[in-house]
Amino acid sequence: MQVSFHLVFGGQCEAAFQFYERALGGKIVHANIAVGTAVLAGADILPEQYAKPRGFYVLLSVDDTADAERIFSALAENGEVKMAIQKTFWSQRFGVLTDQFGIPWEINCEQAPAVA
């Protein structure tokens, strides 16, 4: 079993996926974008049926702090930062934003496990 995300847009799917391809280093395959082992699917719906996303975040776990900061900065372009990316007690970097297409993201770079 595999879980993936299906994001809907009100006419901006192509622009959003081109943006995500650059920001996340993914690869567009038809109406999907492969990011690591995950897949984001996307589609446009009729503008009058579109509702702003709410009640979830796309959580992106990154292994490297520099990558976390780069991706956060890219996704924040023309978006809204809810929590600037920063060190927290549970991670090397964590930040929350809504991108320019209205998709909410959490970027997390976990701490390296303690060496015993």
Image (cartoon, grey):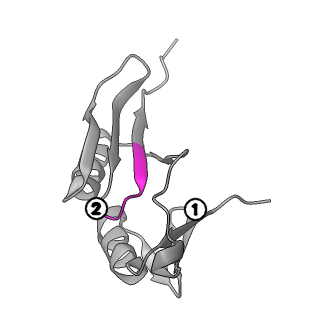
Residue sticking out furthest to the right: 1
**Measured from the top left, where is residue 98 in percent x and y?**
34, 50
Circle 1 sits on which residue? 38
Q: Nearer the viewer, residue 88 or 84?
A: 84
Q: Please name the amino acid that badge 1 sits on.
A: Ala
Residue lying farthest front? 48
Between the residue at mark 2 and the residue at mark 1, the CA separation in whole angstroms equals 21 Å
The stretch in magenta equals: 100-106
Judged left or right of residue 35, residue 88 is: left
Count residues near mark 1 (Cα–Cα under 10 Å), then give few for <14, some for 14-19, many for 20+: some
Residue shown at 30%/64% (left/top)? 23
Q: Is residue 54 magenta?
A: no
Name the quarter where the N terminus is drawn: bottom right
Q: SS for tag 1? A: strand
Position of 49 compared to 93: left or right? right
In the rendering, at what x and y percent does residue 34 appear? 52, 71
Extreme top residue here?
Answer: 116
Secondary structure of the residue carrying numbered label 2: loop
Residue occupying the point 19% across, 59% down? 78
Please tell me whether residue 97 is drawn above or below residue 26 in the rendered image: above
Marks 2/1 in contact by CB < 8 Å: the verdict is: no
- Res 14 → quadrant: bottom left
User: Which residue bears the numbered disc 2?
Assistant: 100
In the image, is 36 to the left or to the right of 96?
A: right
Q: Three-letter amino acid code at disc 2?
A: Gln
Examine the rendered structure and indicate whether residue 40 appears above or below residue 71: below
Taking depth in this image into account, of 46 and 103 the one nearest to the observer is 46
Left or right of residue 110: residue 86: left
